C-alpha cells in the first residue's frame, strides 16, 4: 500500500510540473506576443526591430518596419529585406507585395516591380485599394496601358477612389472617345459627367450624356440639374433643352415636359416644385414667402400663394427659364387673385431675355382682385434670343409692399401655334 501511494504522489507531482511548464510556456508566448504588439505600434525603428525579435514569424511586423524605413526616405535597399521577408511569410497578403514593389521601383528594379505587382494582383484581384495602388505604381513606371486597365477596375468597383481615378485617367489621356471605349465604365458616367463639368469640358460632357441616354441609366435629379445649370450658364440652350427632354424617363420628368399647348412647365402648380432644371426655381427673398395653396385654385388642385411684407423686394423669388426661338412671336397669359395689397405700384409678370436681361413683356399691375382675373399679352423675341426668364417682379423695384397674391393657369405659346390651333378648330 505504501508503494502505491508513493507512485501516486510522484505521478501527481509529474503532472503538476508538466502543467506548470505548459503554463509558463503559454504565459511567455503570450507575453512575447503582447510586447511584440506594443512595440509594433511604435514609430521607433529599434522598437519595431524588438517586436520582430519577439515574433519572427509575424509578417505584419516585417512589413511595418520595411514601410517605415521607406517612409523615412532612407535607402530603399535597407527596407528591401524586411519587405521581402513579409511576402515570404505571408505571400497571400497583396498589400505586402505592393509595398515591396514600391521599394523595387525606388531601386529601379523594373522587372522585380512587375513581378511583385503581378503577385499582388494574383493574391487579391478584386480589392479596389490593391488595384489603385498597383495602378499608381504602373503609372509612375510609365506603363500607361497597365495603369489604365487597373483604373478601369477601380472605377468599376470603388466609389471612394472614383474622383481621383477619373482625374488621373483624364490627365493621362484627355480623349473622351478613348475614355468611354476603354477606361470609364458606364456606372461611373454620372461622376465622370460631374468631373467634366467642373473642368469645363463641354463637348466631352455632352458625349458622356449621350452614352447615358443611349444606355437608359436611371439618373437622380441633382446631377442632372447641375449639368443643366452648366449648359445654361454656357449658353448651350439647345443641348439643355434636348437633355431635359431625354431625361423625361431617366429622372422621372415625363410630367414636366413643355408642349405646343404650353411652353411653361407646371404652369398650374399642380406638380411639386423641383427647384431646378426648366421647372420653377425659387430662392429665399426677405419679406416674401411662397406656398402652394390648395384652398385657392382655378385651373388645378392648387395655386401659388405669394405673401409680401417688406421693403427691398425686387421680385417674388420664383422664376422659370424657357427655351425659345429667335424672331418669333409668343403669347403669355395667366390668372391672379390679390388681397390687402398696399404700397406704391404693384407686382407684375415680367419676361426678359435671360442673357441680356432685355425686357420683352410686362403685364398690367396685379392689384387687389377678389376673383380670378386674367392678364395677357404678346412679345417677339430678338434675332439672338433663345432663352427667356419669367418672374413676378416688383414695380417699382425695392419699394415697400404688403399683401397676398395668388397666381395660377400660367401659359406661354407661340403665336403661330395658337393661330394654327384656332384654324383647326374652326374647320371642325
Image (cartoon, helix red, strand yellow):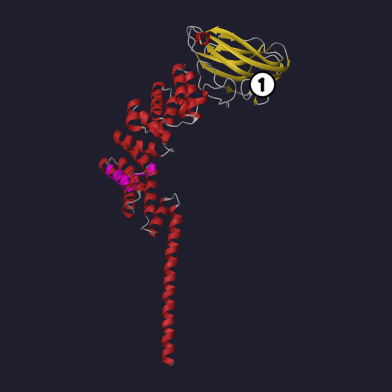
Would you identify the image quadrant in which residue 408 lies? top right
Q: Residue at x 25, y 42 (%)?
A: 111
Measuring from the top left, give residue 272's x and y in whole percent. 58, 27
Q: Nearer the viewer, residue 327 or 63?
A: 327
Task: Locate residue 141 relative to residue 245 in the image: left or right.
Answer: left
Q: How many marks?
A: 1
**244 and 10: which one is in front?**
244
The residue that label 1 is drawn on is 306
Is 122 part of what is drawn in magenta? yes
- Percent position of residue 89, x then y: 33, 55
Residue 379 appears in the rendering: yes
Residue range (magenta) = 114-129
Residue at the bottom extreme? 1
Q: Position of residue 87 (x, y in %)?
A: 32, 51
* Quadrant location, the N terminus: bottom left
Tell me what residue is drawn at x 30 percent, y 36 percent.
146
Q: Secondary structure at mark 1?
A: strand
Q: Is-magenta flag for residue 398?
A: no
Magenta segment main secondary structure: helix
Q: Is residue 95 above or below residue 217?
A: below
Most extreme residue toward the front is 428
| Residue located at (44% from left, 17% from top) | 238
Amino acid at each position: 500500500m505504501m508503494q502505491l501511494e508513493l507512485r501516486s504522489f510522484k505521478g501527481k507531482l509529474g503532472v503538476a510540473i508538466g502543467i506548470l511548464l505548459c503554463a509558463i510556456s503559454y504565459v511567455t508566448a503570450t507575453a512575447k506576443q503582447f510586447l511584440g504588439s506594443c512595440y509594433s505600434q511604435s514609430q521607433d525603428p529599434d522598437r519595431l526591430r524588438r517586436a520582430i525579435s519577439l515574433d519572427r514569424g509575424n509578417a505584419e511586423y516585417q512589413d511595418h518596419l520595411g514601410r517605415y524605413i521607406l517612409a523615412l526616405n532612407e535607402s530603399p535597399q535597407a527596407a528591401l529585406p524586411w519587405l521581402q521577408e513579409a511576402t515570404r511569410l505571408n505571400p497571400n497578403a497583396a498589400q505586402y507585395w505592393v509595398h515591396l514593389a514600391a521599394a523595387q521601383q525606388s531601386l529601379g528594379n523594373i522587372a522585380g516591380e512587375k513581378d511583385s505587382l503581378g503577385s499582388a494582383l494574383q493574391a487579391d484581384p478584386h480589392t479596389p485599394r490593391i488595384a489603385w495602388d498597383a495602378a499608381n505604381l504602373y503609372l509612375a513606371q510609365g506603363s500607361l496601358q497597365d495603369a489604365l486597365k487597373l483604373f478601369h477596375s477601380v472605377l468599376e468597383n470603388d466609389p471612394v477612389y472614383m474622383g481621383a481615378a477619373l482625374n488621373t485617367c483624364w490627365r493621362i489621356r484627355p480623349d473622351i472617345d478613348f475614355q468611354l471605349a476603354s477606361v470609364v465604365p458606364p456606372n461611373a458616367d454620372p461622376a465622370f459627367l460631374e468631373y467634366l463639368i467642373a473642368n469645363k469640358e463641354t463637348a466631352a460632357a455632352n458625349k458622356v450624356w449621350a452614352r447615358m441616354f443611349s444606355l437608359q441609366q436611371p439618373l437622380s435629379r441633382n446631377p442632372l440639374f447641375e449639368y443643366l445649370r452648366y449648359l445654361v450658364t454656357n449658353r448651350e440652350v439647345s443641348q439643355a433643352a434636348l437633355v431635359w427632354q431625354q431625361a423625361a424617363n431617366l429622372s422621372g420628368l415625363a410630367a414636366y415636359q413643355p408642349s405646343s399647348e404650353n411652353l411653361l412647365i407646371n404652369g398650374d402648380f399642380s406638380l411639386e416644385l423641383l427647384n431646378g432644371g426648366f421647372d420653377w426655381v425659387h430662392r429665399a427673398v426677405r419679406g416674401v414667402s411662397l406656398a402652394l395653396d390648395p384652398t385657392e385654385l382655378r385651373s388645378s388642385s392648387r395655386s401659388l400663394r405669394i405673401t409680401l411684407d417688406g421693403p427691398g423686394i425686387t421680385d417674388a423669388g420664383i422664376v422659370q427659364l424657357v427655351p425659345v426661338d429667335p424672331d418669333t412671336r409668343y403669347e403669355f397669359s395667366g390668372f391672379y387673385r390679390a388681397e390687402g395689397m398696399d404700397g406704391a405700384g404693384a407686382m407684375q409678370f415680367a419676361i426678359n431675355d435671360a442673357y441680356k436681361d432685355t425686357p420683352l413683356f410686362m403685364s398690367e399691375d396685379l392689384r387687389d382682385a377678389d376673383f380670378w382675373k386674367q392678364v395677357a399679352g404678346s412679345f417677339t423675341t430678338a434675332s439672338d434670343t433663345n432663352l427667356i426668364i419669367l418672374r413676378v417682379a416688383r414695380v417699382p423695384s425695392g419699394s415697400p409692399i404688403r399683401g397676398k397674391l395668388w397666381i395660377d393657369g400660367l401659359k406661354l405659346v407661340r403665336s403661330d401655334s395658337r393661330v394654327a390651333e384656332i384654324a383647326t378648330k374652326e374647320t371642325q
